[in-house]
Amino acid sequence: MFWSPLLDRFGERRTWVTICCLREGPACSAAAPDRRAPTDPLDLLIAFTVSSATQDIAIDAFRVGIAAKGEEGTINSLRAGLYRLGVLAAAGRPCTWSPPSAGPGVFLALALASW
């Protein structure tokens, strides 16, 4: 409730989404198990989650801004359903198809996909 008014005041929604995408990729690639991250893993987790939450706020604001009166529920249902499909496609499949030794490669592939 404190963060979203700041996003509206200091930039466009499209800019915030782009900035967040550019921050999430490096944070995800630095978290790959075989890489020695220059920062603490907790710092990477905080950076990734703050960026992800900021991106979610900007996308939700954009969604509400383009929705016609009375269509908010339908649009929200579609967004939630497609989000779940995206999670399964982006994380579920690569993680279940790859052998355990391919963990670092999966992290790096997901990081590249987020860019």
Image (spheres, rainbow, N blue to C red):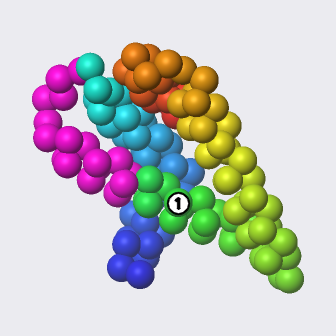
Residue at 20% across / 41% down in the picture?
Answer: 41
Q: Quadrant of the N terminus?
A: bottom left
Rendering coords of residue 39 (x, y %): 14, 36
The local secondary structure at tag 1 comes to helix
In the depicted view, which residue is nearer to us: 21 or 37?
A: 37
Horizontal side of 54 relative to 64 (left or right) equals left
- Which corner quadrant of the image does residue 66 belong to? bottom right
Report the residue at 47% width, 41% height from top: 21
Q: Which residues are magenta?
A: 35-51
- Whether residue 9 is visible: no
Q: Main secondary structure of the magenta part?
A: helix
The residue singled out by tag 1 in the image is 56
Residue 44 visible to the viewer = yes
Q: Within 10 angstroms of label 1, few (less than 14), some, or many (20 or more) residues? A: some
Query: Measured along the vertical axis of the image, is residue 19 above or below residue 72?
Result: above
**Residue 80 is drawn in which quadrant?**
bottom right
x then y, percent, for residue 100: 43, 22
Q: Nearer the viewer, residue 12 or 21?
A: 21
Q: Residue at x 40, y 40 (%)?
A: 24
